[in-house]
Image: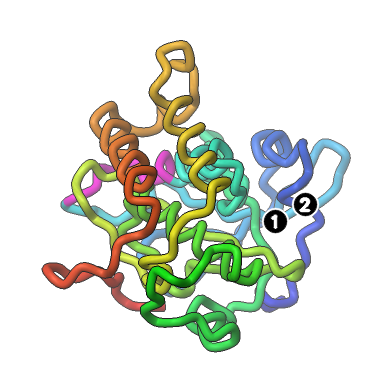
Amino acid sequence: MTSIVDITNSWSPTDPTVEELLAESTFDTLRQFTGASNYVFLASMVDQSGNKGFAVYKPVAGEQYLWDFESGLHLREVAAYELSKLLGWNLIPPTVIRQDGPHGNGSLQLFIGHDPSTHFFTMEQDINLPENPDRAVKYSELSSIEMSLMKLAVFDYISNNADRKAGHVLIDEKQRIWGIDNGLCFHRDNKLRTVIWNFAGIEFDSKLIVDLQRTLEFLSSPIDMNCELYSLISSSELESLLDRIQTLITERTLPAMPSEFRAFPWPLI
């Protein structure tokens, strides 16, 4: 059996037709990922031209019961992708809903080729991220990978990600950072649990603020009620999302890790 690390995906996240490929291609074979709390499959897909690609299929039927999240985590997976697009950060692999999957309705996310032994903690060691940088550290002084990781931390804050494990942070062959497994996002109550607390206190640059402000205005505008994000999360969850974006625009930095509740996911990887 081919190892995950040896899989090369011919479909690219930068291909303008990638959403169409995910939405319209035929499922060929499925390979279940073991160790996941929900049913997750690596799907080999065939497009209309006979070309193959790989995607990650998460059927609703394979979701475990959670007391604090309603069923339908696949919608949150797609919502995370849509929010990443609105921000212009492209941190979440292209993700669509497929109602015709082999195990029924679910999300289908482009598979990102990566080395599973590389995750946030190994990246942290390689690039020597400071554990608690003070406010004198500037965003412009960060490396490109550090900037992407900081954007992912910002994304997780505003999306209220309750499960950003180290293994949910991938780096591809082009050294791009990706955040996967985003089904536990957008709760209206504070649920943030993440391993990425390294960027507290680093002041946002003007471009990052502009991205947040533009997204806030777009999601707050009545003329944009056809925005796909509105159909994926509840109105109360949307309001909480807008509040979190406004908080970061006002504070211009990420908060420090709180001490009053557990702020890490479990397991960590």
* Element under disc 2: loop
Instruction: Tell me whether circle 2 and circle 1 mark residues in contact (CB < 8 Å).
Output: yes
Taking 172 as reference, is 21 above or below it? above
Q: Which residue is mark 1?
A: 54
Q: Residue 221 in the image: x percent, y percent?
A: 42, 18
- The single residue placed furthest to the left in the displayed view is 260
Q: Which residue is mark 2?
A: 11
- The single residue placed furthest to the right in the displayed view is 49
Amino acid at dot 2 = Trp
Quadrant that contains the C terminus: bottom left
Q: Residue 12 in the image: x percent, y percent?
A: 76, 52
| Relative to 47, 66 lies left or right | left
The residue lying at 86 percent from left, 44 percent from top is 50
Frontmost residue, 91 versus 94: 91
Q: Which span of residues is magenta-colored?
A: 68-76
In the rendered image, residue 14 lying in the magenta stretch gets the answer no
Quick check: can you spot residue 173?
yes
User: Looking at the rendering, which quadrant does residue 245 occupy?
Assistant: top left
